[in-house]
Amino acid sequence: MDTASITIPGPVNSPYGKIDYLLGKVPGSTDSKGKGGYFAGYLGFSSGDDLAKAMQNHLKENFGSALVRNSKIEVTAPITGPNGVTANVKSAWQIRADGSVSFVTALPGPH
């Protein structure tokens, strides 16, 4: 896999992107608030850039154990947040027609 082709898309249909969503920054979204409780509250991510880099590394470092089905990649592995807490995270990725890999979402993984 060409790790240079891994991207995290910015906002498309809203002023908020996927990382904002994970940090709980989407107003009026209880789902975003819940994800923010995990990624910002529990793991200590406050910077979108830091969380985006962590998600990219999550895929790169665990690609060998990833579940790849057709054009989808699923990774379940630990991430250590800026506050030193380590917890499992499940991330989902899409392989695009041009071979690039695009971030879809992430959620708390199994304990």
Image: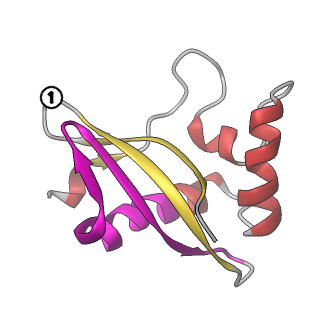
Q: Which residues are magenta?
A: 53-82
Indicate whether 2 appears above or below 64: above
Position of 1 with respect to 108 (left or right) is left
Residue with the most extreme bottom position: 84
Indicate whether 91 appears above or below 45: above
Residue at the location (23% across, 70% down)?
64
| Position of residue 77 measured from the top left corner of the image (x, y, whole percent) | 47, 70
Total tally of numbered discs in the picture: 1
What sort of colour scheme is used for the picture?
A: secondary structure
Between 35 and 102, the residue placed more toward the observer is: 35
Query: Which quadrant holds residue 2?
Result: bottom left
Position of 2 with respect to 85 (left or right) is left
Query: Which quadrant holds residue 110?
Result: bottom right
| Position of residue 104 measured from the top left corner of the image (x, y, whole percent) | 45, 38
Residue at the location (30% across, 61% down)?
66
Indicate whether 12 appears above or below 59: above
Query: Does residue 8 belong to the magenta stretch?
Result: no
Residue at the location (75% across, 58% down)?
38
Q: Quadrant of the C terminus?
A: bottom right
Position of 68 with respect to 62 (left or right) is left
Q: Name which residue type carries label 1.
A: Ala
| Position of residue 44 measured from the top left corner of the image (x, y, whole percent) | 76, 68
Let me know if residue 49 appears in the view: yes
Residue at the location (14% across, 58% down)?
1
Residue with the most extreme front position: 111
Let me know if residue 25 appears in the view: no
| Position of residue 72 measured from the top left corner of the image (x, y, whole percent) | 29, 40
The 10 Å Cα crowd at callout 1, few under 14, some 14 to 19, many 20 or more, is few
Mark 1 element type:
loop
Query: Which quadrant holds residue 97?
Result: top left
The residue beneath circle 1 is: 97
